[in-house]
């Protein structure tokens, strides 16, 4: 039996209410299903900007002046050396540290997630907690630089011997220390280094420092050949590499720096290794001549033992670098040299270390980095905080 409704006020109210509910239900369903439609490629990959995320490390702006010390990857992964580093930054003027991302051995010092790098297998977990270490340094407002030893790389040569510097008979060449080198003209190596740099930035490094960006300088140079850069001018090869680094890393907001031979500050040629100071200046944010007094030969500036005269050596070398930088229309603030903090040619007491730094200051330069391969530094070399 059909039920009939009385056409009264109550009935009309119920009908209106049901109708409104129906409309709201339809609207809700319609908008709820919209995200399920097929999206275009561009819509699907619109980046989400996160104000804070544990997967996106923070980065620190380059301090001015910068005062840094070097730490090997082994030292950076060691609790004792870390304690010494934290003490340095807590109690002295040090506000930056340079840590090996990849050293001469070719081993990357922390885990990576780039499939190509994983496949090569160059990771050796010397600093397994790299993100945590960098976060702790950032909490102390310490700027962290990742050093990448570029063409000196025994490990990658073993994986890709076709990229290696060779002997005249085609076998892999080694320097006097037994270290194998990659041909600086091998473009696949350039891409490999760029991938490492991007991984370093992704885990928190604030700057990428490229070392050994040159041709070999010791070893049997009479029995050496370059299958990738044979017949090319070495200076041109290195210039092209500098340019390529800048172009390929331009999309990553990370400063890049270059380590050069100390003699590039005053030499009139490429020293046979492809390095010219003014070639590097346009492509790097900072250029770091390694002006260790012990590395200048006897007779330099008339000194039989240049290491015993750090002020004179640094003043002359960096004054020459300043003049060349100005002539190249570049800023002298790009000059940030490596200074000696190790015993060679002389016992490097605090007096000798400070003499180098004072020479810098007298020239109007303010930023510097101290090198000791053993990663040990005397607090007496440094000004208390």
Image: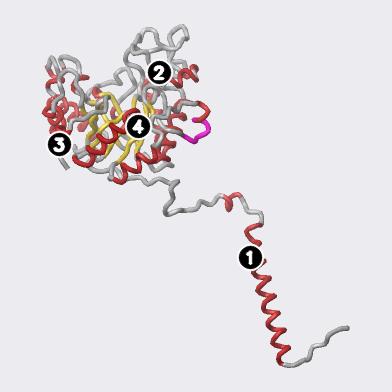
Tag of residue 203: none
SS label for mark 2: loop
Residue 248 appears left or right of 259:
right
**Total count of labels:** 4
Q: Are marks 1 and 4 in contact (CB under 8 Å)?
A: no
User: Could you tell me which residue is drawn at 72 percent across and 84 percent down?
Assistant: 15
Magenta region, residue range: 112-117
**Looking at the rendered structure, which numbered label has been put on residue 31?**
1
Give the Cα separation between the discs numbered 3 and 1: 66 Å
The residue sitting at 33% across, 19% down in the picture is 273
Q: Nearer the viewer, residue 124 or 289?
A: 124
Residue 210 found in image quarter: top left
Q: Residues within 10 Å of mark 1 (few under 14, many from 20)?
A: few
Q: Position of residue 182 (x, y in %)?
A: 42, 20
Q: Nearer the viewer, mark 4 or mark 2?
A: 4
Q: Which residue is mark 3?
A: 361
């Amino acid at each position: 039996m059909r039920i009939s409704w009385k056409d009264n006020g109550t009935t009309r109210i119920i009908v209106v209410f049901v109708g409104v509910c129906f409309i709201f239900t339809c609207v809700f369903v319609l908008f709820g299903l919209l995200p399920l439609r097929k999206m275009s490629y561009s819509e699907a990959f619109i980046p989400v900007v996160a104000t804070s995320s544990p997967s996106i490390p923070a980065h620190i702006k380059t301090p001015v002046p910068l005062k840094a010390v070097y730490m090997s990857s082994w030292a950076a992964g060691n609790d004792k050396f870390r304690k010494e580093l934290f003490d340095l930054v807590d109690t002295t003027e040090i506000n930056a540290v340079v840590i090996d991302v990849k050293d001469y051995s070719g081993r990357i010092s922390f885990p990576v997630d780039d499939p190509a790098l994983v496949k090569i297998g160059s990771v050796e977990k010397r600093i397994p907690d790299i993100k945590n270490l960098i976060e702790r340094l950032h909490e102390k407002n310490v700027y962290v630089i990742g050093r990448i030893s570029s063409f000196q790389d025994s490990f990658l040569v073993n994986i890709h011997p076709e990229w290696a510097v060779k002997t005249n008979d085609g076998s892999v060449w080694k320097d006097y220390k037994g270290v194998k080198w990659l041909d600086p003209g091998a473009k696949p190596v350039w891409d490999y280094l760029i991938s490492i740099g991007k991984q370093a930035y992704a885990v928190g490094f604030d700057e990428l420092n490229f070392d050994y960006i040159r041709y070999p300088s010791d070893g049997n140079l009479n029995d050496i050949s370059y299958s990738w850069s044979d017949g090319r001018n070495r200076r041109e090869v290195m210039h092209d590499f500098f340019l390529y680094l800048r172009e390929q890393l331009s999309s990553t907001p990370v400063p890049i720096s270059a380590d050069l031979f100390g003699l590039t500050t005053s030499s009139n040629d490429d020293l046979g290794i492809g390095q010219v100071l003014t070639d590097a200046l346009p492509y790097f944010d900072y250029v770091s001549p390694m002006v260790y007094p012990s590395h200048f030969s006897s007779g330099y500036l008339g000194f039989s033992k240049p290491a015993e005269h750090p002020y004179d050596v640094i003043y002359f070398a960096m004054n020459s670098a300043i003049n060349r930088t100005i002539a190249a229309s570049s800023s002298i603030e790009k000059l940030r040299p490596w200074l000696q903090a190790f015993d060679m040619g002389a016992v490097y007491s605090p007096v000798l270390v400070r003499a180098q730094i004072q020479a810098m200051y007298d020239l109007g330069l303010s930023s510097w980095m101290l090198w000791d391969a053993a990663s040990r530094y005397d607090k007496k070399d440094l000004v208390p905080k």
